[in-house]
Amino acid sequence: MKPVQSTLQKWMRENENFQEHYAKIRREVLNDSEIKAFLAKHPALTKKEIDKNLIKLYEYMTQSKQCAKCTSFENCPNMLPGYSPVLHVEGGEIHLSYEKCYERINYEKQREQQKLVQSLYMPKQILEAKIDYIDSDPKRSQAVREILKFVGDCEQEIPTKGLYLYGPFGVGKTYFLGALANKLKEMYISSALIYMPEFVREMKASMKDDSLNKKLDYFKKTDVLMLDDIGAEMLSPWFRDEILGSLLQYRMMEGLPVFFTSNYSLQELETHLASTRNGVEEVKAGRIIERMKQVSQPVAIFAENRRT
């Protein structure tokens, strides 16, 4: 039995319509400005080599190069969406390969960045916060300066201390955390932004499906941890000592920063943490506060309520 290739070549020679179509495509390809430029750079290529790889040249000609015909990654017209064709010569032979286009690189970068901010029950407004949107209220200027300093320091190395932002309701403490998380995302620094009351409930629920240690381990090791509204509810001795205490101890030992927001000063929070159903536990509460001081520094924010 004759090889398939020789049979196909015989059919191509004998089929007049195909030959006409082939000749037309060949003219289009060889008259294409990009193909002509490519062949001019490689004058040693033989007619036989060019004809043998006409289909590769045609494929290259018909594909969008680096998003020239694209409006977005999702609407890429290429055979391989998000990839741009590249012609090159090796050993006197024409080769066609594909590389990631600009749109795909941006798309992957955005997806990668999105994964860097893990949030637990934070509102959309906070997750879309930007440092550039923060106004120049002088009553919040110290907090803004400290946040910008932290970001600046991150360009060299992530600092070992975050901030303990405290003050009354509605002064923008949580917004600052969201804005910081998004800024860090641009720098490829991961963060976990957690609403404290929901974090307590999440950890309790995790005991039922044995996922507590896995989740706690993630929060221990994320680059920058942010605990929003600590003190918003009464913590059980178990959560205070076994969960929060373990979390802060690990980050303190590893030199990993934590950001907090609270309506309490550290002294007031210590009193709050000491109060349990079993009585007042000042020593254990004081131990938590000392760990908090090791991973953050207090900054008061006393400004107008922006929620009213």
Image (cartoon, rainbow, N blue to C red):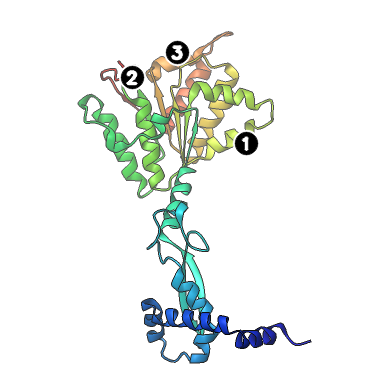
Element type where label 2 sits in the image: loop
The residue positioned 39% from the left and 42% from the top of the image is 184
Quarter containing the N terminus:
bottom right
Question: In this view of the protein, which residue sits in the foreground, 19 or 43?
Answer: 19
Q: Which residue is mark 2?
A: 170
Q: Which residue is mark 1?
A: 214
Q: 201 left or right of 195? A: right
For marks 2 and 1 on the same chain, the one whose residue lies earlier in the sequence: 2
The amino acid sitting under disc 3 is Thr
Give the foreground label among 2 and 1. Answer: 2
Element type where label 1 sits in the image: helix
The answer to the question of whether label 3 and label 2 lie on touching residues, with beta carbons closer than 8 A, is: no
List x then y, in percent, for residue 178: 39, 33
Neighbor class of circle 2 (other Cα within 10 Å; few <14, some 14-19, many 20+) is: some
The answer to the question of whether label 2 and label 1 lie on touching residues, with beta carbons closer than 8 A, is: no
The image quarter in which residue 160 lies = top left
The amino acid sitting under disc 1 is Lys
Q: Which residue is mark 3?
A: 271
Q: Which mark is residue 147?
A: none
- In the displayed structure, 59 sits above or below 176; it is below
Question: In this view of the protein, which residue sits in the foreground, 75 or 135?
Answer: 75
The residue positioned 46% from the left and 13% from the top of the image is 272
The image quarter in which residue 69 lies = bottom left
The amino acid sitting under disc 2 is Gly
